[in-house]
Image (tube, rainbow, N blue to C red):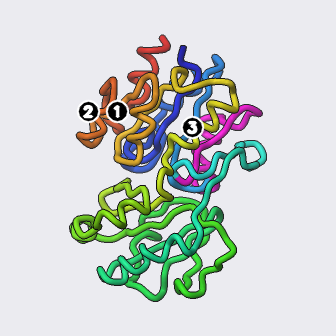
Amino acid sequence: MIKMVALDLDGTLLTSDKTISKGNEQALKAIHDDGVKVVLCTGRPINAIWRFIEQLGLTEEADYTITFNGALVVHNNDKAELAKSGIQKADLVPLHDFVKNQGAPLDILDFEQVYPMTDLKPSMYKQQFKGNIDFVPRSFDDLSTDDEYSKAIVSDQPELLDKYQSNIDDDLRAKYHIVRSQPQIMEFLASGMDKVVGLEALLKHFGMDFSNLMAFGDAENDLGMIKNAEIGVVMENGQQPVKEAGDVITGNNDEDGVAQFVNKYFG
């Protein structure tokens, strides 16, 4: 029985102009009112998506959000941490060496802010980011060795990201979970980190498992939850490998694709 619905944001729940349509809002509020847990799953921190949480009314005692692509599970009401897993600075040295060699930019995120690396090419990430988070320029050498970091971002023109991605060797791939979340954004997470990690912790917290989960997504960073969910729903605009992994294809993100399937399934 489906008791939890997990939703990616960009390209899935959000339209191309980064809003939640009235149709999607009404469909999700209806199932939430009926006791189904509605969980937003994003690479961003919770403050950056708070307007969406409020719009959907996900501010009750049992409401949580998966942030930083699974690295942090947050209780919406008080921002308390249910589960957290980070990366040490030492783990990011091979990535910094790689991007420096490629002439690429790099942003490193802890669980509160973004550090654009000033010793590298300027990044496009700040222009892509919509939400409430501080960008604090810093050189890699000046990053704290005591803090935990949630992930790193390489953000550049899509054709340049294609080139960087093609130059990643097996040794580097073994060190990180690398996902192309958008054409201009490539994310480097701890090895094994995925939205599915955060969802597993949240499901366990509620005494559930993946047989109780429906997940909506469109991109590479949604693949884990699409594969593991009892019902993996992929948007019509989704990437082909994600479509192949899913159970159902719904409409696109600009045509209330989420609401189309939610209304059909839950009646």
- Asked if the magenta segment contains residue 63, the reply would be yes
Spatial distance from mark 1 to mark 3, Cα to Cα?
17 Å
Tally of numbered discs: 3
Give the side of residue 244 with respect to residue 60, left or right: left
Q: Are marks 1 and 3 in contact (CB under 8 Å)?
A: no
Q: Quadrant of residue 60?
A: top right
Q: Callout 3, which amino acid?
A: Leu
Earlier sequence position, callout 1 versus callout 3: 3
Residue on which the image places disc 2: 244
Region in magenta: 46-68
Question: Which numbered circle lies on residue 199?
Answer: 3
- Asked if the magenta segment contains residue 160, the reply would be no
Q: Callout 2, which amino acid?
A: Glu
Which residue lies at the image location 69% right of the left edge and 35% below the top edge?
63
- List x then y, in percent, for residue 30: 58, 21
Q: Nearer the viewer, residue 126 or 113?
A: 113
Disc 3 crowd, CA 10 A, few/some/many (<14, 14-19, 20+): many
Disc 2 crowd, CA 10 A, few/some/many (<14, 14-19, 20+): some
Which residue lies at the image location 29% right of the left edge and 67% below the top edge?
168
Q: Callout 1, which amino acid?
A: Val
Spatial distance from mark 3 to mark 2, Cα to Cα?
21 Å
